[in-house]
Amino acid sequence: MKRMPMRKWINDRPILFWTLSFIAGILLSFCIICGLWWIAVVFSVALTTVFILCRKNSKALTKIALLTASFMLGTLVFWANYVNILSMEVESSPCVVTGVFTDRVYDGNNYMSVVLRDCSVTLADGTQINVDVNVILFDEEQIDLVATGYKATFYGEISYNYIFKDGVDSYTYKNDVYYTVTSVNGLTVSQGQPTLAEKCRLYILQTLTRYCPETADLSYALIIGDKSFVDGNDMQSFRTAGIAHLLAVSGLHVGFIVGIFEFIFEKFKVHPLKRLAVSLPLLLFYAYLCGFPASVMRAVVMAVCVQLCRFAFRKVDLLTSLSAACIVILSVKPLYLFDAGFLLSVSAVYGIATFTAATNRLIKRRFSGFTAKILTSLSVSFGATVGTMGWSLYFYGYLPVFGTLVNLVAIPVVSVAFICIVAGLIPVVGQIFLFVSDKLILFVLAVARAVSSASASALVLPSIGIATVIIGIWLFVYGGYVNFKGKEKLTVHCLLALIFLCSCIYSFIPKDAGTRIFINETYGDSCVVAVNNGEVAVISNLQYGETDKIVSTMNFKYESLSLYVTDFTNVRLSAFQLLNEQRKINSVYVLDTSGNIAVERYCENQSIDVVRVPKNYFSGNDVKVRSIWDGSLVGALVVADDMSLAVVTTDNSLLYGNLALNLKSIPTALMCSAPTADMLKDFENSYIFTTYMTDKNIYSSNRCGNFTLIQKDGKILLKL
C-alpha cells in the first residue's frame, strides 16, 4: 500500500527560525544576569527532552541541531558584548578631558548636553582612556564656546553610564557613549575640523534653515532623523497623531531612496547585481550620514537581501529578508533587542509581511482599480499598526486612535516632501523644490495638530504583556505561514482570539499598588510618583520626557491624581495635556511662586484646580507634600504613610540645614543632583538618590536605574 506523505504544518522559513533561536539565546543570557536562573534550567531540560524524543528522526534532529547552534551563537554574542561593556567601567573621578565637539547636541532648558569624540581622558590616578564622552554644561559662557569640530580641553568629573540597570539603557548603548562628564571648569577651545558627515549635516541644516524657515526643524528630522531641534509641542502632536515614525529615519526613508533607484533601474532593465553595486554604497553613505541607527541598518540589510533574492531565486520573501537583517544587526549589537526603535521598526515590517501580505491577496481577488489601491494602502498602514501595537503600549502607554487614517494621508505627502528635500539640497537649482517641501510639511503639521487636539485622539491602555507574543503568533497564522484547512483555520483563529482577549483583560485589571514611592531620577528628567490608599501625588515639572514615564509607572488602581510642581514657569503645556488625557489630573499644586499662563488657561478649561501652596505648608491627604523654603524653595517633602522622600531643588549646600531639620522624625530618602559631605553626615541613616554616582553608598540612577520605596516594620525598604 502506498504511503501517504506527511502533512507539512509550517511553511519552511529556516532563517526566520534561526533568528528566533538566536534571539532566544540573547534573552536567556539576559535572564541569567538578572538572576532568573530557573528559566535557564527549564529551557535546558526542555531542549534535552526534545533531543531525546527526536534522536531516531535524523531530519528533525538536524533541524534541531541547527536551531541549537543558532541559540548558542546568540548566547556567545551576548556574553562577548556583556564582558566588553563591563571592561569599560571606571569609578567616578576628577579628570582632564581633551576632545572634539560633535553636532550631537541637546539644548535643554537650563543646560546643554554635547558629545565629544576622539577624547583623551586622564583620570585622577593618572590612567588615560580614549573614549567618546557626553558633557553637561550649565554655564552660558561655556555653552557659547561649543562649535562642531572645535577642540576642547577642560577639567571635570567623569562617571560611567551603566547599561544594565532596570532593564537596558538602550539610548547609551546605541549611541556608544558610555561616559558623562559634569562639573566642567577651565574650558578652552581651539579651531578644528568637522568630519565629512558633520559637514554634510551642517550644510543640510543651514540650507533648510535658509529656505524652509517654518519647517526647518521638521525637515531636518525627516531627512537625518535628528529630532533635537523639533519643538516639543509639535513632537507631541506627531506622536498623538501616530506619525512620529516619520521623523525617525527608518525603513520608510530608506524605502523612498530605494524607490527612486528602482524606478530608474526598471526603466533601463538593470541587472540585480548591478543594482546592488550602485545602490548599496549610496545607502551606506546615507546610513553614515544618519549615524548608523538600527532601523536604517535593518532596512539597508533588507534591501541587500531583496536584490540577492531577485538574483538567486527571481522572487522576494519579505519575512526572510527581515529575519536576515535582524540576525546580522543583533550579531553586532545584541542589546538592540531591548531598544524601542529597533523593536518598533522590526515589528512594523513583520506586520506588513504577515497581515498586509495576506490581506492584499484577498483585495486583489475582489477589487480592482482605485478601490484596490486605497484598500492596499490601508492594509499596509493597519498591518504596521497591528504589528507595533504591543510594543507601543509597552513603551508609551497609549495607541493613536486615528493613526491608520493619518498615515494614509501623511505618508504619500511626506514621501514627496522627502524627494523634494533631497532635490532641494542641490546648489542653485534646488530652491523651488524646498519651497514645495516646506508647504507639504506644513500641511502634515497642520493635520497632526488638528488630530492631536481632537478629543479621544489617543487610546490610553496598559501594557498587554504576553498578548504581544500572541499577536505575533496570530499574525504568523493569518499570513498563511501555517497550513490549516477549513474549520481548522477558523478554530485556531477563534482560540488565538480567546487567548488574546483573556490576556488583555488580565492586563487591563488595575492592580493595587499599596503604599509606594516610585523614583525616576535621570539627568534633567526626574519624577516621583507616590501612592497611598488610592491617592497619587506626582512631583515633576514635565519639562522633558517625564510624561511617558509617569504613565507607564501608574499601571495600578488609583482614585485621584495631584501634580506638584517646583518650577511652574517651565512646565510644558503639551506634556501636561498628554498626562491629563492619559491619567486625568485632579489638582495642580504650585510649590514655587512662578506662573504659567498657558497651563493655567488649560486647567481652567478642563476644570482642574490650581492651588498655590503657602511656604513650608503641607498639602494632600493620604499622600502629603510639603514645600520647604529657606529664603528660596529648597525642596519638596513627600510623605506616604511612614515613608518620606525629599526632592531637593537647590544645589546650595548652605541651604541643606533647614531641609535636614524637617526630615528627622520619620525614615527618609533624599533625591538630589549633587550630595555633599555635609549631606552625607546629616542623612547618614537615609537612602540618597542622585543621577551620577559620587560615592559607593549613594544609589545612583546612572548605576542602578529607577527605584521603588516600600515601607515595612517602621523601615524604608528599597527595591531596585
Image: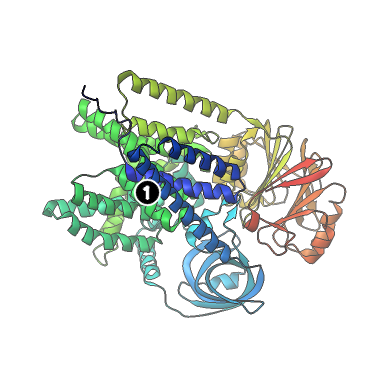
Q: Seen in the image, is 203 located left or right of residue 173?
A: left
Is 124 placed above or below 701 here? below
Residue depicted at x 40% and y 55%: 329
Instruction: Provide residue 15's location: percent of width, then percent of height.
Output: 34, 46
Residue furthest to the bottom in view is: 190
Instruction: Provide residue 177's location: percent of width, then percent of height.
Output: 52, 64
Residue furthest to the top in view is: 487
Any part of residue 617 in sight: yes
Residue depicted at x 58% and y 72%: 142
Q: Secondary structure at mark 1?
A: helix
Instruction: Provide residue 374's location: percent of width, then percent of height.
Output: 26, 33
- Location of residue 447 (image quadrant): top left
Is 20 placed above or below 386 here? below
Is 694 placed above or below 231 here? below
Q: Which residue is mark 1?
A: 442
- Location of residue 421 (image quadrant): bottom left
Q: Seen in the image, is 33 located left or right of residue 406?
A: right
Any part of residue 235 in sight: no
Residue depicted at x 64% and y 34%: 556
The foreground one among 715 and 584 is 715
The foreground one among 547 and 351 is 351
How busy is the neighbourhood of tag 1: few (under 14 within 10 Å), some, or many (20 plus)? some
Q: Indicate the quadrant containing the N terminus: top left, top right, bottom left or bottom right.
A: top left
Q: How many marks?
A: 1
Residue depicted at x 46% and y 36%: 469
Instruction: Provide residue 328's location: percent of width, then percent of height.
Output: 37, 54
Q: Amino acid at mark 1?
A: Leu
